[in-house]
Amino acid sequence: MDSIHEHGGDFFDHDPSMAEKSQMRKERLPPSEWLKLLCRDWVVENLEIAQGADLKFLGYKSYLKGKLSSQLLCRLSIPEFRKDGKDDSMSFNFWRTLGLEDEFDIRHIISQIEKFCSLYSIRSTIAEDELLDDALDDSAAAAAAGLLSPLHNFLTTGLEMNKQASPGRREPRPLPLSNKAATIATHEKRAAEKLSRETTREEKRQKKLFLRHHREKIALEQKEAALKRAADLVSSNRIPIEITRGASLPKAVKQVIEQSNASASFTGSKRRSDIVVSNASDLDRIVTHAKNLWIKYNAIAKEHNQKISWAMISKELGIHVKVREKYARMHARAVQRGFDFKRRGA
């Protein structure tokens, strides 16, 4: 440190040597001494502020014994830049903590510290390229003076030729013919396996597509057959036995028939109806058949002093009574809104 002060003029006019850089990286001084070293003219006019900074720093971080290392000085003073490119200097202002209020003075001190950090390589390790340049300069000077041995010249020439001959990436070693044949056979085998998997996958997809179309076709045929049976039931002369003979049967027989029907409905497996409404035309047809069948059975039931229910109509059509009620509500709403089943039914 004394050797640094010995030279005259400004502190930054001196070109430091490698030894001085290494010494400066190990230096620890109070804040006022750093200010006297780096900002001599400012300290002359603000001596009280510089001396007060030592007391405030000692009270701020007492474990540092009132001294700052050169690396800590640079890292506390020089602002960091975040990844988004914004200046982070306003998040923590070290010199404002030590009693400096004037923003211009703070900027001046920070600029001097940045110059000091760059000149003495404080925040980075001592550049190895400088050491390498010094070594190359020494070797060049020695070669010019004829002091290097012939072995050194031979090794240096060989290294330079190797650098020129070898590119950044080495060429791969050529494989023997047997290995090439095995590699080609492996690639062909993998390609054949991939093609076979794709063919099998396409066959399965086509099979599933065919089965789905087949199921849809069968369901459509069954639906049309069920609707035709409902239309034939309306136009036929068939009458349920519950209407014609319901009055003459004793009450006990009626109860036995109802219990047997109920037990059969619980024990037997329920088969889903073939009438599946898929469009408005289907809805109109099934509701119309139900209404016509109701009118027909109701007229016959009145002649025999009987009453019929929608459950009977639904049973004759082969659908559940709740499903018929749902279809009736849907049809009523469509009619109320003026829906045209003939033109827009499909």
Image (cartoon, rainbow, N blue to C red):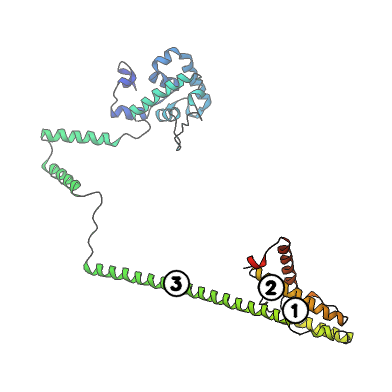
Looking at the image, tell me whether mark 3 or mark 2 is earlier in sequence order. Answer: 3
Looking at the picture, how far across and down is residue 45, in whole percent? 44, 12
Q: Residues within 10 Å of mark 3 (few under 14, many from 20)?
A: few
Q: Which residue is mark 3?
A: 202
Residue 254 visible in rendering: yes
Location of residue 135 (image quadrant): top left
Residue occupying image coordinates x 72% and y 64%: 335
**Quadrant of the snapshot with the C terminus:** bottom right
Q: Residues within 10 Å of mark 2 (few under 14, many from 20)?
A: some
Label 1 SS: helix
Q: Which mark is residue 285?
A: 2
Q: CA distance from mark 1 to mark 2?
A: 17 Å
Label 3 SS: helix
Q: CA distance from mark 1 to mark 3?
A: 45 Å
Amino acid type of disc 2? Arg
Marks 1 and 2: which is nearer the front?
2
Q: CA distance from mark 3 to mark 2?
A: 40 Å
